[in-house]
Amino acid sequence: MSLLELRNVEARYGPVKALHGVSLTVGGGELVAVLGANGAGKTTTLRAISGTVRRTGDLVFGGKALPRRPEGTARAGIAHVPEGRGTFSDLTVWENLRLGAYTRRGGIKDDARRVFGFFPRLEERRHQQAGTLSGGEQQMLALGRAMMARPKLLLLDEPSLGLAPIVVNEIFEALERMKGQDGMSVLVVEQNANLVLAHAARAYVLEVGAVVVEGTSDELRANQSVRKSYLGY
Amino acid sequence: MPIAAFTWTEFAQQLAAGIREGAIYAGLALAIVIIYRSTRVINFAQGEMATFTTFIAWSLMNQGLTFWEAFPIVLAIAFTGGVVIERTLIRPVENAPVLTIVIITLGLALLLNGLMNLIWGGANVQFHGPFSTRTIDVGGVPVSVQDIGIVAVSILLVGLLALFFRFTKLGLGMRAAAVNRDSSRLVGVRVSWMFALGWGIATVLGAVAGMMIAPVVFLDPNMMQTILLYAFAAAVLGGLDSPVGAVVGGILLGVTITLLGRYVGFIGSTLKLPAALLLILVLLLVRPGGLFGKVAVRRV
Amino acid sequence: MRRRLWLELSAFVVLAAVVALLPRFVSDFRARELAIVGMYFIALLGLSILTGFNGQISLGNGAFMAIGGYTTAILSVDGFYGHQVRDLWTIPIAGVVAGIAGLVVGLPALRLSGLYLALITFGIAVSFPQLPKKFDHFFGGTTGKILNLAKPPFGLSTTTNNWIYYLTWGIALVLLVAAWLLVRGKTGRAFKAIRDSEVAAVSSGISIGRYKTLAFGISAFYAGVAGSLYAIANAYVNPDVFPIILSVYLVVGLAVGGLDSLFGMIAGAALIYFLQNHADTVARWLNHLPALSLDPQKPGIPSVVFGIVLIVVMILLPTGVGGLVRRLFGPLTTRLYTRS
């Protein structure tokens, strides 16, 4: 049974419907990608899962119905790194990390050490205001913050946005190692289809708020229309 | 501008009076800063809420309780009251423009003021505080024990608050909820309850401030109105985000106003507040965030 | 967009018609009351431009009203180099004097924002009433100055109160049109850009300093005109005529009206006038409800009523009357939500 199951999920922003019945699954320890053009509903899908936007439909997480509000989904073991990273700019790096562990009881020293292990640059800057970090460092911080919660499912929205390719590779490598260590599942929204398909086991392609193609990375890379529209060859 | 005859003893006395004044502003300023820090709202009802809880204390003491017996009861009532007010009046409009929420606090101030007039009449009453009014000699300057008590309590409160915000998880959650609600929710902070907690704490601070002030200025429904103005000035002076700033700002303001009022004849008593605000304006031009406030750094 | 334009034009025509015809149906005293509502309306228009459209909060516009009122008083009583100025002509002068004061205030205001600005402008409101007391030979001290009673000009045969009503609302309608044109034009767009994002505005080449100061000047001009009219209607000025709390009332009216809704300011003006002067009426009316026995004479009742009304109004209409009107007429001027 999958860790996360979405069946016919709909969501709207005011009068405009953004998701027209999205269905997908994420298994334990899997890295699954969500592709699509701008406005296709990728970010909305993540928001629907974390509860940031109101949605209808069946959402099952770990066999139980998914809580409706973000506070609930966070406690259930879902960490959402939103578009724009959502860093607490006025707080320090260390405080950002502490907040990541908000729902956990007990000591966080070990988790912090792990995060610093993945991202040594964060340790150097631990008492700096998060807003003064570079884009790449903020992405690392956002990821680190998510890790502090030891989530079962990590929702990542456009991690490569605005970052240099070298930095993006660093981040994806760290992601792979994290996933390997904890058996964490990851659902990644990405514009850079080539990049993410190199790391993902499966992927979904969204168009106008619904899934149009799904399959393993290899299947998608072989798919003619996907290649033309999203992979550029 | 004639400067009156100067003696060191008198200066010290004025200084002490200024510090005492300042500690009074500091108490209320602290409450203002707490609510601002946790909810980004300026609570114009802060003064009236403080007076109201002080009247409750007075009623309890009238029923035979001593100050220290009534004290924890009043604090509990204050905390509950603050939380209830936030849940009923502020929660419904959490996402409205800030000005709307501010007007609601204004309405609350009027409501409480009217209620106090209704319930306890307009008479000045004597409030017996916890500190004795006898004076002791500090290096040749007579200082009242009460004044020392007020200053000590303010400093203690600020210390406790600073510790709370810096080192506890709840304090961190409150700070996070204030600066970024959406991200806070994503990490599991119950943002709504953080706001309620902020109001509860602030109301408790106001209650303490009220009970410190009442022995000095006589308890009546309008007790806190001018003090509220000075408290706002102190909060802004110190930087609206900083509890330490509120206390430092309060004491600085108290000292400056007292000394100005005494030694600069031009100012006298009517122009004390305008003079204070002018000084604060000058300071803000140099440091727009106040003494300890952080001017937000944003990486575009 | 065209549909919205037609709606606003029709609203204006209706308003003008109501204004023109209303005095026939109401008592003379009511006309005076409505005139004062009109003065608040003018002041609120200015505040809306400053706070609603330009995002600068001011708790000191009562002081600008006072400047306008005192200018009118001084000019018409003491005169200009001995020449007493006719009260009508003092109105624009009062506006300009207040406007200049606004520009002056606007300069240091550039460094401040949000609550820091609110406090400093409140400081102005608090300080200003002290000035007439300190410089009493010029300002008339606590007793103030007494003007000649307003008379309808050109021997028009109408009551004083009606005259004041038409004068005020005539000016109000003109200033409403001016404000409306302003916010729809280049200046208005610059104001709104600054309000929404100073960083973005600067990158678009908008001179923040110039427009923010201008906004203060304009709002002070409006307040000055309102204050001037008030002085004429009152026939005297002293520090109590423009008290500290006036600035607070203006902000209340602004919020109730709906921040950046020009037409909404009428509602805001009506509310602040009504609450100040008729809290006892509301108390008496509430008395009719069973289980409530509110003796309107008891001290504190007006405050309780005023407070409750404010709270209820703002909870029910968080975006003010203007917001409500926009929601009601929204479907008529459909705007598609676009996700960025």
Image (cartoon, rainbow, N blue to C red):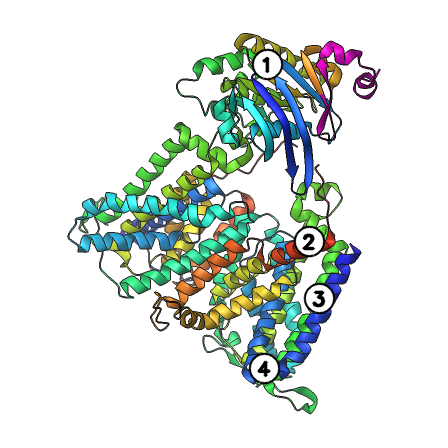
* Secondary element type, mark 3: helix
Q: How far is mark 1 from mark 4, CA to CA?
A: 75 Å
- Which mark is in front, 2 or 4? 2
Residue for badge 2: C330
* Secondary element type, mark 2: helix
The quadrant where residue B245 appears: top left
Of residues B243 and A32, the one nearer the viewer is A32
Residue for badge 4: C26
Residue B108 in the image, given as x and y percentages of width and height:
42, 56
Of residues A94 and B116, the one nearer the viewer is B116
Query: Magenta stretch?
Result: A205-233
Residue for badge 3: C11
Residue for badge 1: A27
- Which mark is in front, 1 or 4? 1
Which chain does the numbered disc 1 sit on? A
Which chain does the numbered disc 3 sit on? C
Q: Quadrant of the N terminus of chain B?
A: bottom left
